[in-house]
Image (cartoon, helix red, strand yellow):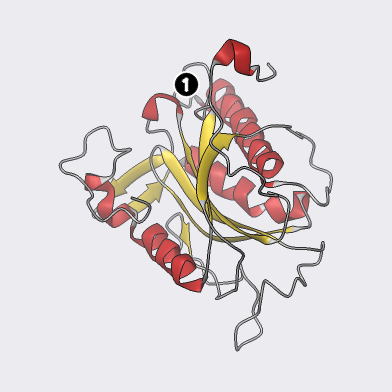
Amino acid sequence: MKYDPKKHHRRSIRLKGYDYSQPGAYFITLVTQDRACLFGEVVDGEMRLNEAGRMVEKLWAKLHHKFPNVQTDAFVIMPNHFHGIIVITSNPVGADPRVCPDETGAHAGMGAHTGMGAHTGAPLRVCPDETGAHTGMGAHTGMGAHTGAPLPEIVQWFKTMTTNEYIRGVKQSGWPPFRGRLWQRNYYEHIIRDDAFLNRIRQYIAENPLRWHLDRENPHRTGTDGDHILG
């Protein structure tokens, strides 16, 4: 159903005037409906993905095939939410000068995989500032290549494809059903301002399983994470 502000009474808090298709890096967070823990569990500070979690990981890896202007960087799949860094480049082959290789020649998104639902990437330079949260618009559910896509379209494709695959898992493999939708309607995004912020986000992503007992998305948390990177 198309978003109607008069009907839904939702206030967009996207950064006004910002072009979300321009080159840059974005830190996104998706949370499941009702904060349902559907993707695995954290055991001794490590995220152990179940079949559904591995499905989310697989589709994240396909983003750059669907959108040639996209590279993926650090990410983590948690029991009921997802954090990841999306880099939008200025051309389909990822040769944007704002996305710089490190000393070894590796581009963003080519770092080592940790094997536990988390990934760390190589250094890059990124674009300016500010933060926001908004509703993704404009789904493309096909698997064909697409160029020049803005961030909302990229995120909506990811949400749609993971939802479709999860529904298939419910029907064919007995995955736990969800109420209404797999992901909450809104998602959160922060424009990465500089290398220092990028590195803090990467560290936050890497340490997310260790801090699960304090995580604001954990329905059984035992304390408050006062050191949340985004406040």
Q: Is residue 121 left or right of residue 20?
A: left
Q: Is residue 28 visible from the viewing direction of this image?
A: no
Q: Nearer the viewer, residue 231 or 153?
A: 231
Q: Position of residue 67 (x, y in %)?
A: 76, 51
Q: Residue at x 29, y 40 (%)?
A: 216
The residue pinned by badge 1 equals 178
Label 1 neighbourhood size at 10 Å, few (<14), some (14-19), many (20+)? some
Q: Where is residue 199 in the image (x, y as percent from the top left)?
A: 45, 70
Q: Quadrant of residue 25?
A: bottom right
Check the image and report above or below for 195 versus 24.
below
Q: Residue at x 51, y 43 (%)?
A: 132
Residue extending furthest toward the front: 17
Determine the secondary structure under disc 1.
loop
Q: Quadrant of residue 93?
A: bottom right
Q: Nearer the viewer, residue 158 or 150?
A: 150
Q: In which quarter of the image is residue 105?
A: bottom right
Q: Is residue 11 visible from the viewing direction of this image?
A: yes
| Quarter of the figure with the N terminus | top right
Q: Is residue 30 left or right of residue 62?
A: left
Q: Please name the amino acid that badge 1 sits on.
A: Phe
Q: Where is residue 78 in the image (x, y as percent from the top left)?
A: 40, 45
Residue extending furthest toward the bottom: 103
